[in-house]
Amino acid sequence: KEQFTDQGVTKQYTSARLNSKFAFTYGRVDIRAKAPNASGTWPALWLLGKNVNEDGGFFDSNFGTTSWPACGEIDIMEHVGKEQDMVLWSTHSKLNNWSLGTQKTNKSIIDGVSTAFHIYKIEWSKDYIQFFVDDKLYYTSPNEGKGADYYPFSSPQFLLLNIAVGGNLGGPTINDAIFPCRMEVDYVRVYQ
């Protein structure tokens, strides 16, 4: 909990976001992690298109030609802080996203998200992205052959790990007693 002003907006909290400097196309990603046990947090393990036009992004100066969601986003895991143990898996694209109400997503209760480590995994190919927790398949987002505006996941993506504070999934009510809080990540492994 701290007051922070950036780009003319003052906020009451700061949080961490780690962006990888490695982008890849297709393969398997395993992340062993434990989410924070705190309403008001919105932790995520995810990927964004290397071509995302995002100020401050590692790839932006050379590859940042496309805005979100057209760049593609793969949510390996998002935890709903206001609903402990609720996990979401999603893919976002120009034609499939929250703002249009057409996002490709699934959610389920995963017991012990904040009390034990779990392995969040995707298997990503030109044909589909499959989402697993502890080797149990929870969701498949298929390539339906409708082009890059629908399935932009045939281009390089990079990994992000973050905890957001507040927002739609974290919850607007934040109890200051939760701070400091953390998401623990044991490892991140990419197989190609």
Image (cartoon, helix red, strand yellow):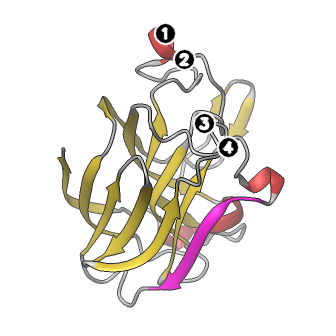
Is 155 or 172 nearer to us in this picture? 155
Whether residue 74 is in magenta: the answer is no
Numbered mark located on residue 148 in the image: 3
- Quick one: SS at disc 3? loop
In depth, the one of 168 and 132 nearer the eye is 132
Mark toward the start of the polypeptide (4 vs 2): 4
Label 3 to label 4: alpha-carbon separation: 36 Å
Label 4: element kind? strand
Q: Earlier in the sequence, mark 1 or mark 4?
A: 4
Label 3 or label 1, whichever lies nearer to me, is 3
Crowding at mark 1 (Cα within 10 Å: few <14, some 14-19, many 20+): few
Mark 1 vs mark 4: in front = 1
Pointer 4: residues within 10 angstroms few (<14), some, or many (20+)?
few
The three-letter code of the residue at mark 4 reads Lys
Residue 111: x and y in percent read: 39, 90
Q: CA distance from mark 4 to mark 2?
A: 27 Å
The residue pinned by badge 1 equals 61
Given contact means CB atoms under 8 Å apart, are the residues at marks 4 and 2 in contact?
Answer: no
Name, please, the residue furthest toward the right: 100
Specify the label residue 64 is tagged with.
2
Residue type for callout 3: Ala
The residue beneath circle 4 is: 11
